[in-house]
Image: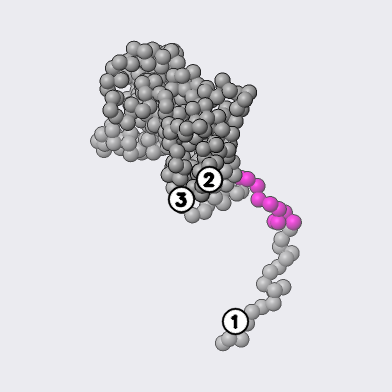
Amino acid sequence: MKENFKKAPFSAQVDLSKFSMGDFEKATDDEKRQQDVMGESTTFFKDGMRRLKKNPLAMGSILILILLVLVILFAPLIVPYGYDDIVKGSANLKPFYYSTQELKQIAAGEDVFPHIFGTDSLGRDYFIRVVYGARVSLSVGIIASIIVLIIGMVYGSISGYLGGRVDLIMMRIVDIIYSLPDMLLIILLSVVLRETLINAIKGTVLAKLGVNMISLFIVFGLLYWVSMARLIRGQILTIKQNEYVLAAQCIGTSTARTIRKHILPNCLSVIIITTALQVPSAIFTESYLSFISLGVSAPMPSLGSLANEARAGMQTYPERLLFPALTICLIVLALNLLGDGLRDAFDPKLSR
């Protein structure tokens, strides 16, 4: 019986005359995408993440952001200085330099942590101030983006789903908000609501941020959600005509559940992309306001306020302007590249 199943020679198994040189050409992009479609079943999110991992710029941006977050979280645990601690006799030190008093301590055998970025005019460690400034900027960007996401998603969903006169009135409100100057509103809120906000946040964690930063969050909640609302409304106007939405309506599904379960999941690409691109925009706005002294209250540092303080000694101590400026550029560039990568990965129109 074993002889009947003896392996035939290679020439008998494969007839090479049936193949041509065209059979060995490289697959086209359309053929590769067809293979992806014919592959194992996957979810929209997993498919988007698979495409994102193939983007070297996006993955490099994620790595840079992870390193920045690790430094922001763990540097204050390692560096023995606080952002407002004044080291006597250590004013205006260059990076990795020590004051006379610190040199004496080192000579006596004491361990003195180096000033990695030097010190400012008051003798405060500049590295830890840049770290806290980056922490403030990233926190503002993330919190502001969450505010924009929540308000814009709710408003755009209601407007697009209900349609008709409700949609008309809600979109006219959006047009009015678009015409309001955001910077002027921040200044007005800082002046008009100063006393009210000071009393409201007194004794809380928000008191460290100051009235100007609270005004910034209020303005983000009042103004910056309109772009998100318009994008989601446009998506919903198209999606709500699909059969599965009509089927949900026919069986008596409530409006809130229909939006939450059947419509918003299909707007996921727009939500992810817009939110990711909103973070660097919010960081840049906060840095700009801090640069013109409308940001966090002293002594809490911000990257913008550090750059503003460094202008006075720019010729003598250029590194004080260089460090916060490079940090802002690195954070904003990494977030923008990540946002572009998310758009390429999750936007179905770009994958066709």
Q: Position of residue 170 (x, y in %)?
A: 35, 18
Q: Position of residue 149 (x, y in %)?
A: 39, 30
Contact between marks 3 and 1 (CB within 8 A): the answer is: no
Image quarter of the C terminus = top right
Contact between marks 3 and 2 (CB within 8 A): the answer is: no
Q: Nearer the viewer, residue 212 or 48?
A: 212
**Disc 3 marks which residue?**
42
Residue at x 46%, y 52% (from the top left corner)? 41
Q: Earlier in the sequence, mark 3 or mark 2?
A: 3
Quarter of the view holding residue 296: top left
Q: Position of residue 306 (x, y in %)?
A: 51, 26
Q: CA distance from mark 3 to mark 2?
A: 61 Å
Q: Nearer the viewer, residue 135 or 253?
A: 135
Q: Amino acid at mark 1?
A: Phe
Q: Residues within 10 Å of mark 1 (few under 14, many from 20)?
A: few
**Disc 2 marks which residue?**
106
Q: Nearer the viewer, mark 3 or mark 2?
A: 2
Q: Residues within 10 Å of mark 3 (few under 14, many from 20)?
A: few
Q: Amino acid at mark 2?
A: Ile
Report if residue 177 lies within the magenta region.
no
Q: Position of residue 42 (x, y in %)?
A: 46, 50
Q: Amino acid at mark 3?
A: Thr
Q: Secondary structure at mark 1?
A: helix
Query: What span is in magenta?
Result: 21-30
Q: Nearer the viewer, residue 299 or 17?
A: 299
Q: Say the numbered circle drawn on residue 5.
A: 1
